[in-house]
Amino acid sequence: MIVDKTYGLWILLRETALPLGILALWDLVVVILYQVFHQEWMEQPALPISLMGSALALFLGVRNNAAYARWWEGRSLWGLITNNSRSFAREAATLLGGRPDLAKAMAAYPYLLRTALSNTEQGPDAKRLLAPEMYERIMARTNKPNALLYEIGLCVAEEVERKKIDGAVHGTIDRILSDLANAQGGLERIKNTPLPVQYSVLPLLVVHVFCIVLPFSAVQTLGWITPLGSSLVGFLFQALDKSGRDLQEPFVPSRHALPMLTMARTIEIDLLQPIGEAVGGPIPPQGGVQP
């Protein structure tokens, strides 16, 4: 996630530079054909393009709102993951009488969840936090984050049985695990349910068509400065479309995705410091981007 606004503007300009350059070149071709070779068929009325631009702006606004809603819901669910992980570690210490291994296991959970959502290779974090036998069992499962919650639930049940802890205490901890599973289910729903094609593909096509026909309605009014005016308007629509496409997939590894690694590291620090484990600091931004 981009946290430096200046760097973020530079990224946006760099990512839209190629389509903007192509658009400016096309505008130059149109103005040369009209001004030099007097292609009168290019004298198209401005009203249809104006109406098309207004409709396209509304369409992009609706799509971008839907994309941001997905991004923000993902961030909200990760907030639930963070809060419930902290609650579990606290109750494991106060109600179960310790069990630092359970705090470490819960600290490994967000790392497993991150790699499952982003479809990336499993890093060393979960392996260093989990007991070897538990790690092997989890790696053999398809849904590794869910498998870890299952293993943690079994450990809690064994501890409750061994220490003859009241069932109400067990129910309290189990509700936290259920809330974690529900939040994970919400994140998986976002990952496995992309935006409809009407929202994900159609805006890109319509923006390109609009940018192609835009100079035809501007050249008779702007003349030789058509590449400047048409390119600026085209850049606006290109940037709006790019913003929506960046936000609609909040877990795909990119500069615009949720900072899942940073959140996982924060959870690990919050869970392990109270039990006296030596942990480093939070992950700092790298080049204006929070990983």
Image: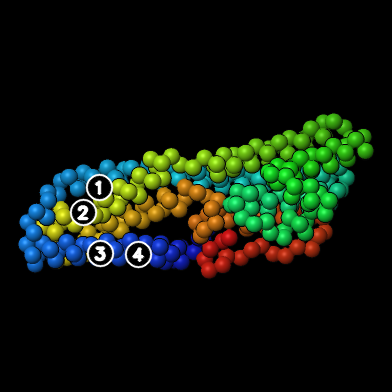
Of the pair 34 and 185, the residue shown nearer to us = 34
In the image, which disc is placed on residue 243?
A: none
Q: Which residue is mark 2?
A: 214
Disc number lying in front (2 or 1): 2
Q: Residue at x 81, y 60 (%)?
A: 277
Q: Which residue is mark 4?
A: 18
Could you tell me residue 77's position as x and y percent?
Answer: 60, 43
User: Residue at the front extreme?
Assistant: 140
User: Residue at 72% across / 60% down in the picture?
Assistant: 124
Residue topped by disc 3:
24
First along the sequence among labels 4 and 3: 4
Query: Residue most toward the top?
Result: 167
Crowding near pointer 1: few (<14 within 10 Å), some, many (20+)? many
Residue type of the residue flagged with mark 4: Leu
Pick the quarter of the image with the C terminus. bottom right
Task: Using residue 132 as the reference point, say whether residue 288 is left or right of it.
Answer: left
Which quadrant of the figure has residue 123? bottom right
Name the residue tied to disc 1.
53
Q: Residue at x 6, y 62 (%)?
A: 38
At mark 1, the secondary structure is helix
The kind of residue tagged 3 is Ala
Estimate the spatial distance between the alpha carbons at disc 1 and disc 4, rounded to whole Å: 22 Å
Q: Are marks 1 and 4 in contact (CB under 8 Å)?
A: no
Circle nearer the N terminus (2, 3): 3
How busy is the neighbourhood of tag 3: few (under 14 within 10 Å), some, or many (20 plus)?
A: many
Within 10 Å of the Cα at label 2, are there few (<14), some (14-19), or many (20+) other Cα atoms?
many
Q: Are marks 2 and 1 in contact (CB under 8 Å)?
A: yes
Q: Amino acid at mark 1?
A: Gly
